[in-house]
Structure formats: structure tokens, C-alpha cells
Amino acid sequence: MAKIQEMTQLSPTMEEGTIVKWLKKEGDSVSPGDIIAEVETDKAVMEMEAFETGVILKILHTEGAKLKVGEALAVIGKPGEDVSSLLAGIPQKSSSAPSPVTQAVASKENGNPTTPQQEKPDPVAVVASPTKEIPSANALPQSKTSTSINSVTGLTGVTGVNLTNRGGLRVLASPLAKSIAIENGIDLHSVIGTGPEGRITKNDVLDTLNKGTNSRSSAAGPSRLDEVVTLNGMRKTIAKRLTESKQNLPHFYLNVDVNAKAMEDFRADLLEFQKHLDPELQVKVSLNDIIVKATAAALRLHPKVNASFQGDSILQFGRVDVGIAVSLDGGLLTPVIRNADTKSIIEISKEVKELAKRARERKLKPEEFSNGTFTISNLGMYGISRFTAIINEPESAILAVGSVEEKPVVENGVVVAGRVLSLTLSCDHRVIDGAVGAEFLKTLKTLLERPSLIAGVI
């Protein structure tokens, strides 16, 4: 009997997935475990397995379709089996159909321009009294339909078009003048009419348009059109989870400055030592790798920070799994270094590089970016001095790392030029008290300013 292959939940936070590529086609034989498609989740592009034995009788959605978890993806059954009744029972998915904007673009390319949401009231009528002189939205030039509609309805303050004066009375303008104004986003209040009784003519609008164009081109160059960027699955998840974290977790912040000279010298010594090793054994250790190791060591010494709020209890993790925030095109991901407190700086450096590479390629497995106990977010490479980060639930803290900067420091009572690193710890006050967070930062500062101590902590 034929069965439906559903969109499977491929990651813990996945709510919907986009079909990137079908690896099987209709008529192909499959069995449980066979990879039938590549699906983009909110975190990565992952492989979807078949759960039935048979042949693919029907593929219900093409590549690029976005489906919620549990929605019908394909039908698998015996060769030649009649699945008409099964297909009839599958709810029609409206969200997989092209959006009104996509339909408009496609129609235009096919030489049949249409306007999205034509069933809605004529937007011009919203701001102007009905008249044959005013063109409907469907009569607007399609290359500027969306911009013109927004302008007419007053949704954009920059190029808003208003066909009534500020007292609610109509602006006197010829039909052609109004049409040109709508098409080019000109506010008729800014146009001086030279016709009878101050009526605005075509030439008045064109003069205003030419003056505005010359002014813009001489002052700031060509203007840039608004662009609507559709949220991908990853960005939706980031928006949802960080909003929930900021709203639900009582954040407070602790900041400390670290004298980074010893840490930089330590890194230089590591790199110099590795020059004598086989090239295959050489690893370009970064300051961030040292920070990860020192943080893991400090977490081992301060288990109250390596914890999670559980509603009626607090879970102090026995493991130290440190997540590293990695920026991606369209979002960010947090690969996790498992048991970071037990690994050397060289091991951490290798693992960070490999995980970051596969994160950017969207090839990480769910277990490689979930269930961390603490997160580090480093923006120092962008020249950011200091910042505050939002906690990645269900963790209770996140460390924001800024750049190393030249600043005056006091050494043995004397002010000298120094190298300073800023660290900011965001804490969930339900789990971490101020003193607890401060003690953790004090230990971390000591380890970074005397990195030779790191090896002796664990």
C-alpha cells in the first residue's frame, strides 16, 4: 500500500525545510535509509532519508519548495499502484505556490503583466477622490508597480505621492500630470502649477522631476531602490530564538579588560615553535583558540556559570562544551567544541577551523551545533572594541570578545603603552549572581594574562 513521505524534522529547531535538490526521481526504487533529497533546514543543508520500501510514485513538490515539518513530500508505493485517492486526501499547500510578487515577475517575463493582490481596493482611491483622471494600480508601468503603489498609499515617506492637499481638498492637476507624478514618486504638493487657477500641468511635473534628478545626481549620485529580502529558515529561527531569549531571560552584563600582551607573546611562541615541526603538524593558532581554552578551564573551576535554568531547578553541567559563533551568509551558526576543557590549544584550533569551514558550507550535523553549555562570540576581527551578546538558550551565559587595542596600562605603578582586550559576560540572573559571574571573569582574566597557568588548571 502506498504511503506518504513527509518532510522530516532534521534538526532540533527545524520547523520547515526547503527542497534544495531531489536525488531520486519518480520511478526510482528506494528503501529505508536511502537518501532521496537534500533539504535546507534552519541550520544546514541536510540529507533526507526514505522511510518506506518501494518506488517513488509521485513527487509532490519541486526543488525550491518550502514545506513545514510533517507536510507531504512524495508518495512511495508499489510500481503501477493507483494513488489517486491518496493524493486526493492530501491538503493543498498554498504556501508552496509562488508568492504574489513572484507571480507578478513571472507574468511580466511572459509578456502578461499583472499586479499582486489585485483583489484589494485600488490603492489610489485610498488617498484621492474617485475620478477617471486617476489611473488604477493595474495601469501603472509594471517596472515600478510596487514602488508606485507604496508611494500612492503613503507607505513610503521618501517618495510618497499625495493627490489631495493638506486640507483634504484635491490638488488641481491634469490627468497626465497625475500619471507622471505617480509613476515617478513625485509629491504634487511640491509642484507649482502654472496652468489656470494654479492647475498643475505635465510640464510642471516634468520640470520638478528634472530639477530633482539633477539635484540628486549632483549631491549624492543615483538613488537606490528599496529591496525586500525574504527571511530564510536560519534567519527566522535566529529571530525567534533570540527574541525569546532577550524577553524571557533577565540578562545582566559584566565587563573586564585584559592585558593581552602575555597572551600575544604566548601565541607568538607557539607559532615559532611549530616552525620546527613537520608542515602537516603545524597549526596557525589564533588568539580566539587561546581564549576558548582559557574559558573552558575557567568554566571547569566555576561550574555555577556552566549551567542551565530548568524551571524548578538549575542544571550544572558535568561537561564543558563550548560553542563558537560563526557568521554565515544569511545568519550564524554555533559549532560546539565538545569537552573543550580536556583538549589542548592545538586540538581546539584544529577543531574550530574544521567546524567553521563545514558550517559555512552548511554541512554540519545537528549534533555538531546543538547542546552546548556555554558560547563565545568574537567580533574582534571586525575592529569592535566591546559589545554585549544575547544568551543562547538553554545556556545561562555567553562571552562577547572584542578586539585587542593599544591603550595605556599601569605596570608596577607606571603608566605604559599596553595591549588591551575587552570581555563582556552576559548572564542569566536566574542562574548566575553578580558575584559568581565576577569570580568567573576574574579567573579568566588571570589565565589570559598568565597563559602558562592554563595547562595546570585541569
Image (spheres, helix red, strand yellow):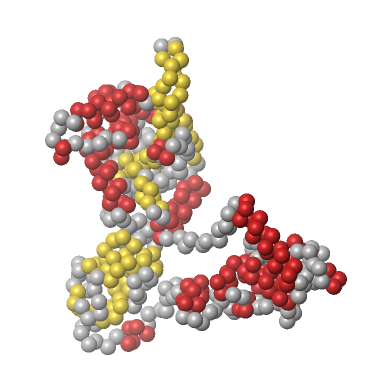
> Is residue 140 rendered to the left or right of residue 206?
left
Q: Residue shown at 51%/82% (left/top)?
A: 112
Residue 357 at what x, y percent from top left? 28, 49
**Farthest left residue in view:** 278
Q: Looking at this rendering, what residue extends furthest in the top direction?
A: 413
Query: Which quadrant is the C terminus positioned in?
Result: top left
Q: Out of 107 and 234, give the one closest to the viewer.
A: 107
- Is 443 left or right of 81, judged from the image as shown? right
- The relative height of residue 208 versus residue 57 in the rendered view (above or below) is above
Query: How many numbered marks does the figure carry?
Result: 0
The structure residue drawn at horizontal position 65% and vertical position 65%, both measured from the top left corner, is: 185
On screen, residue 137 above or below 167: below
**Furthest residue toward right:** 197
Left or right: where does residue 431 sit relative to residue 337? right
- The residue that appears at 37% across and 58% down in the rendered structure is 42
Q: Position of residue 214 (x, y in %)?
A: 65, 58
Position in image of residue 8 (x %, y %): 31, 66
Depth check, front residue: 352 or 431:
352
Can you see residue 422? Answer: yes
Q: Position of residue 25 (x, y in %)?
A: 25, 77
Q: Quadrant of residue 222?
A: bottom right
| Corner quadrant of residue 410 | top left
28 in relation to 266, above or below: below
Specify whether residue 153 is in view.
no
